Image (cartoon, helix red, strand yellow):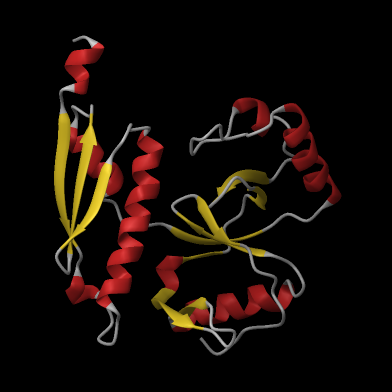
Amino acid sequence: ATERDAAAFTAHMLMELAVDKLPPDADVADALARAIEILRNRVDSLGVAEPLIARQGDRWVVVQLPGVKNVQAAKEIIGTTALLEFRMVDDSQAARDAAAKIYEKVGDPFAGGSVASTAAVALLPPGTALFRGRGSEYYVLRSTVPLTGALLDSARVETGDNGLPVVAFKWKPEGGKVFGDLTSANVGKNMAIVLDGLVQSAPVIRGPIRGG
């Protein structure tokens, strides 16, 4: 098939938010907005030109992917459960030097995509990995994943003391203990919140956080 033939194909999908799986007091509109953001991140990883991702009604999202012929493969990529990870930012001198070399020699290690270039990865110290942020920034994180969203009971967006949105986590008992130990051992360091391989934020741990 020619490039023109491939462009004639458009994958159409209608996805429903699983409202019955949300907490009773969840903000459905907010949950739908976050679902759309996750879908955009996943579609970006497919390299689709001019995709359409739009809200339809109060619980549906329509997705159109021009030029995509394998609809099933696309569904498997964008329809999987979101992967939430908590990773520590590597603040060692070796990691800082590597980040500087990547900026100097490689420039944008992701070149607009979701996978770091081989040249950038080759400059990383052992035991680290390179992750893209929400903008043009990138992070050198430790390869180990001390905690994932599998131990979360729920997560929702709330308004913080400064009026800005913050993510409130409620852990399962075992998750609360791991999170408490992790924050206690890393006070003053940055912890990255990674969703589907994209760093959403990397706040400084101000003190131990216990109690779930």
- The one of 153 and 11 positioned closer to us in this rendering: 11
Horizontal relation, residue 94 to residue 49: left or right: right
**As drawn, is 151 to the left or to the right of 184?**
left
Work out whether residue 173 can be spotted: yes
**Residue at x 17% of width, y 67% of height:** 59
Callout count: 0
In the depicted structure, whether residue 77 falls above or below residue 15: above
- The residue under the point 62% across, 43% down is 130
- Residue at the image position 44 percent from the left and 52 percent from the top: 196
Q: Residue furthest top?
A: 2
Q: Position of residue 86 (x, y in %)?
A: 55, 63
Whole-percent x and y of residue 105?
75, 27
Q: Position of residue 94 (x, y in %)?
A: 83, 45
Q: Is residue 170 visible to us here?
A: no
Residue 57 left/right relative to 34:
left
**Residue at image location 78% in from the left, 32% down from the top:** 104
Q: The N terminus lies in which quarter of the figure?
A: top left
Furthest residue toward right = 93
